[in-house]
Image (tube, rainbow, N blue to C red):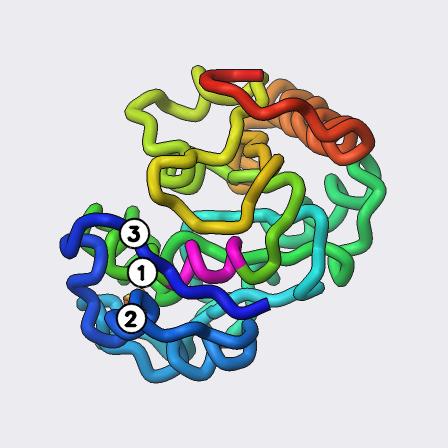
Amino acid sequence: MGVTLSRPGAARFRNPCAQHLRSQAVADLSELQAIASSCQGCRLASGRTTVVFGEGSPSATLMVIGEGPGRDEDLQGRPFVGRSGRLLDRLLAEEAGFERDAVYIANVVKCRPPDNRDPKPDEIEACRPYLDAQVALVSPKVVVTLGNFASKTLLRSELGITRLRGSVYPWPSEGDSPGLGGTVVVPTFHPAAALRGGGEVLAAMRADFVRARRCLEAVPVRGKGPL
Ligand code: SF4
């Protein structure tokens, strides 16, 4: 399925590399990745080794979205390959019943922020067309967002992850990615927080991945606010 993104508001397309995503259909993830691979759409381009586009099943029912590449990811060109990645793999297998290859994994920004700093709002906006296109092309039933940035960005919320997690949300529908009828968002902590924070955070993440699995087993009815 090709997608043409038609978000209202030119501000979303300040990234000239992604500009044409607005008017031209992108046939598949490979074509989108080829566009992103040479992107100079924000200042993060200057410090990256590789564009960490994302990977996994192009028809995944479960998609996982993190914040941005770290050092290992930048070097290898793959998302979630370090300690956080190993924990993510465990949670997917043990709580959601998925091998890594069966899901699709991407980040909010595709290039590593220097010194692993937080991505800035203009960088997130510049990279957003790629993420929207990825979600539209994969068209998952459930999107698990990892941590503050991914959760707040995807849900367009000012609330932090501690407040957001524990609920299931309909995919935002204000002109967002088309073709996502029934998609829901399940926010949870970033695996790095569990590695730092110990058992309580990990237990909450386990519960959230179980929640994601249950959403896949019985896709909820869409509506406003937490489901
Ligand atoms: S972070 Fe996104 S918008 Fe910025 S250069 Fe990388 S791919 Fe382009």
| Left or right of 176, for residue 15 | left
Kind of residue at badge 2? Ala
| As drawn, 61 above or below 95 | below
- Point 34% across, 21% down: residue: 159
For the C terminus, the image quarter is top right
Compare residues 225 and 160 and report the one nearer the observer. Answer: 225
Kind of residue at badge 3? Arg
Q: Secondary structure at mark 2?
A: helix
N-terminal-most mark, 3 or 1: 3
Residue underneath mark 3:
7
Between the residue at mark 3 and the residue at mark 1, the CA separation in whole angstroms equals 14 Å
Image-quadrant location for residue 156: top left
| As drawn, 153 above or below 33 | above
Measured as percent of width and height from the top left, residue 1 is found at: 59, 67
Main SS of the magenta segment? helix
The image quadrant where one finds ligand 1 is bottom left
Q: Secondary structure at mark 3?
A: loop
| As drawn, 212 above or below 75 | above
Q: Secondary structure at mark 1?
A: helix
| As drawn, 60 above or below 219 | below
Question: Magenta residues, as a range?
Answer: 130-136
Measured as percent of width and height from the top left, residue 181 is found at: 58, 40
Crowding around mark 1 (Cα neighbors within 10 Å: few <14, some 14 to 19, many 20+) is many
Residue underneath mark 1:
127
Under 8 Å from ligand 1: the CB of mark 2? yes
Kind of residue at badge 1? Cys
